[in-house]
């Protein structure tokens, strides 16, 4: 019998629904929330309200595009955490209601676990290689930055993580001090393409082991801009591409340094990245180059699956379904949660 999973993602500012059939993507719909742009960050209350408005049309359109009837759905997978509580409640409540009406199980999914499974997302007729286990994954998103050993579809071990800001936060905060709107990561990426990455140098954190820190870089970037603006009030406008290329290169180099160390320490040469920052073209290129140099087997999720999406939630749900790991109607979301 076919296993068809409806996935729901509502942890932050994207409302998404997707259908996975026997592990392959049939549809993946995302409604972005532009409303946060003008506030310089996600406003939790506005995110919850927008999820409420978006969720039914997004689910409807995912089911339609998949060409299935809702009676064929085997289970509903939803993001239980981590994320914004009010935002998570919308997806969780929708999943519970839908499952009750259809008399099917619900499956709770950890958002971070799902980002890792985004590496395995593709359509049935798409020829795409999956990473073999075990592999190292650098998970870089707006809220998290960690290096993990991925043992199988359901189990992983974190061997390094940020002690302060996440990489996505570093991108967004640096963009904000440059006067760019939220989320600034993709904009830094765009400007960086035309810039000289070696024009401005920023110091790297001195953190022992495999942990990360980005707060020092953020502060030195702020002071750097402040000093340069004293000399030229149009400094940012006149040097935007070089500033973006340089700060992007610094963040990505910090990310890759520890990944190289992690590979050396573990002897694992299958290396992957996942999460919103894995969409960064500079990081992708730097990783490919490093991979060639070190004979790594490199895996990067498709661009449409790097940032938040429900297909990754549905796929995590699929593997939990095969393992009969269901959630209860009484389960509540978690703003912070550890592994899966
Ligand atoms: O995984 P994600 O969509 O949401 C979270 O789970 O946090 O990641 C969002 C983060 C944001 O900080 C955003 O600025 C960053 O990913 N991001 C990028 C790029 N695309 C998204 N950062 C740098 N370059 C990009 N192209
Ligand atoms: Zn995410």
Image: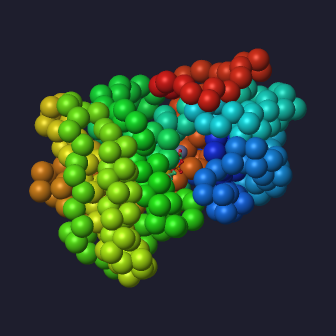
* Quarter of the view holding residue 163: top left
Q: Position of residue 10 (x, y in %)?
A: 68, 43
Q: Position of residue 28 (x, y in %)?
A: 63, 55
Depth check: give the residue in front, 256 or 18: 256
Side of 74 where 157 appears, left or right: left
Residue pictured at 60% horizontal, 57% vertical: 40
| Residue at the far right in the pictured view | 101
Instruction: Pick the quarter of the image with the N terminus.
Output: top right
Above or below — where is 241 with respect to 183?
A: below
Residue pictured at 31% horizontal, 38% vertical: 212
| Residue at the far bottom in the pictured view | 238
Above or below — where is 81 with respect to 297?
A: above
Depth check: give the residue in front, 36 or 239: 239
Side of 30 where 99 appears, left or right: right
Side of 173 where 47 appears, left or right: right
Depth check: give the residue in front, 263 or 242: 242
Residue pictured at 32% horizontal, 53% vertical: 220
> Does the rendering let one see residue 137?
no
Which color mode does the image show? rainbow
> Does the rendering let one see residue 339?
yes
* Quarter of the view holding residue 271: top left
Depth check: give the residue in front, 46 or 151: 46
Q: Position of residue 112 (x, y in %)?
A: 49, 36
Residue pictured at 49% horizontal, 34% vertical: 113
| Residue at the far front in the pictured view | 230
Above or below — where is 306 with respect to 180?
A: above
């Amino acid at each position: 019998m076919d296993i068809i999973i409806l996935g729901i993602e509502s942890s932050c500012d994207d409302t998404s629904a997707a259908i996975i059939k026997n592990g392959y993507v049939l549809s993946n719909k995302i409604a972005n929330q532009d409303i946060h742009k003008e506030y310089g960050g996600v406003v939790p209350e506005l995110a919850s309200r927008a999820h409420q408005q978006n969720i039914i049309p997004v689910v409807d359109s995912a089911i339609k595009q998949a060409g299935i009837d809702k009676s064929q759905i085997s289970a509903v997978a939803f993001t239980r955490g981590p994320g914004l509580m009010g935002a998570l409640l919308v997806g969780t409540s929708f999943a519970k209601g839908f499952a009750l009406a259809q008399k099917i199980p619900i499956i709770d999914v950890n958002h971070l676990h799902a980002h890792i499974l985004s590496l395995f997302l593709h359509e049935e007729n798409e020829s795409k290689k999956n990473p073999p286990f075990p592999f190292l994954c650098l998970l870089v998103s707006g809220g998290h930055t960690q290096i993990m050993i991925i043992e199988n579809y359901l189990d992983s071990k974190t061997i390094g993580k940020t002690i302060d800001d996440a990489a996505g936060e570093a991108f967004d905060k640096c963009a904000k001090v440059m006067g760019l709107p939220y989320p600034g990561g993709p904009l830094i990426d765009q400007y960086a393409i035309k810039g000289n990455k070696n024009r401005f140098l920023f110091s790297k954190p001195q953190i022992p082991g495999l942990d990360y820190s980005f707060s020092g870089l953020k502060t030195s970037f702020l002071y750097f801009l402040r000093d340069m603006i004293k000399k030229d009030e149009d400094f940012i406008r006149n040097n935007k591409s070089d500033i973006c290329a340089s700060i992007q290169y610094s963040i990505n180099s910090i990310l890759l340094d520890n990944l190289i160390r992690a590979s050396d320490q573990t002897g694992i040469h299958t290396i992957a990245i996942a999460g919103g920052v894995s969409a960064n073209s500079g990081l992708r290129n730097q990783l490919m180059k490093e991979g060639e140099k070190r004979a790594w087997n490199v895996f990067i999720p498709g661009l449409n699956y790097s940032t938040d999406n429900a297909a990754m939630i549905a796929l995590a749900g699929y593997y939990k379904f095969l393992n009969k790991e269901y959630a209860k109607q009484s389960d509540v979301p978690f703003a912070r949660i550890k592994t899966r």
